[in-house]
């Protein structure tokens, strides 16, 4: 009889150990689920930030293109003004030459 009791106690202890292991595993699974939810939220946040960066990059690219075109227009205008100034200086020189000959 004592042998049977010992055997039953061992089985009961083993069952209790298994229950404790299952409870620990359930807690681990709960923790893992929470970690996964946190990771999903982090990924969502990063996607949102990445979209903002993409939008800002597009705006900066458009601004750069516009600025480059503006600089090109200014450069062309300056070339024209310098050209006209040289022409005017030449005309003034010619007029002074004619005036000095008189």
Image (tube, rainbow, N blue to C red):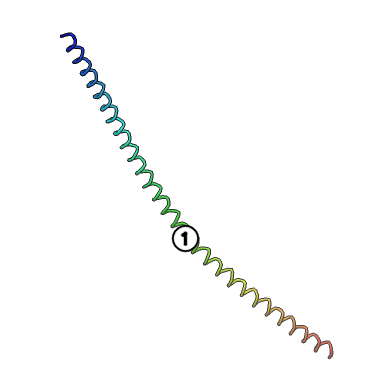
Left or right: residue 92 compared with residue 40: right
Quadrant housing the N terminus: top left
How many numbered discs sit on the rendered protein? 1
Q: Is residue 5 left or right of residue 25?
A: left
Q: Is residue 17 above or below residue 70?
A: above
User: Residue tagged by mark 1?
Assistant: 59
Q: Name the residue nearer the viewer: 95 or 26.
A: 26
Q: Position of residue 31 (x, y in %)?
A: 32, 33
> Of all residues shown, which one is farthest toward the bottom?
102
- In this rendering, is residue 102 above or below 14? below
Task: Name, please, the residue furthest toward the right.
Answer: 101
Quarter residue 88 falls in: bottom right
Mark 1 crowd level (few <14, some 14–19, many ≥20, 10 Å Cα): few
Relative to 54, is 39 above or below?
Answer: above
In which quadrant will I find the C terminus? bottom right
Extreme-left residue of the structure: 1
**Residue at position x 21%, y 19% from top?**
11
Please state which of residues 64 and 21 is positioned toward the viewer in this rendering. 21
Q: In which quarter of the image is residue 53?
A: bottom left
Q: Position of residue 39 (x, y in %)?
A: 36, 42
Disc 1, SS: helix
Residue 5: image location, x then y, percent: 18, 11
- Identify whether 15 is placed above or below 89: above
Q: Which of 14 and 91 is in front in this view?
A: 14
Q: Which residue does the image show at 29% across and 27% down from the upper left?
A: 24
User: What x and y, as percent, mark residue 63?
Assistant: 51, 63
- Tell me what residue is drawn at x 33 percent, y 40 percent: 36
């Amino acid at each position: 009889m004592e042998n049977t009791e010992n055997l039953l106690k061992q089985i009961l202890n083993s069952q209790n150990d298994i229950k404790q292991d299952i409870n620990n595993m359930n807690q681990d699974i709960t923790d893992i689920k929470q970690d996964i939810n946190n990771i999903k939220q982090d990924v969502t946040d990063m996607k949102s930030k990445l979209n903002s960066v993409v939008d800002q990059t597009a705006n900066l690219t458009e601004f750069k293109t516009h600025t480059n075109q503006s600089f090109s227009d200014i450069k062309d205008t300056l070339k024209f003004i310098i050209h006209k100034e040289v022409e005017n200086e030449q005309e003034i020189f010619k007029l002074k030459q004619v005036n000095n000959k008189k």
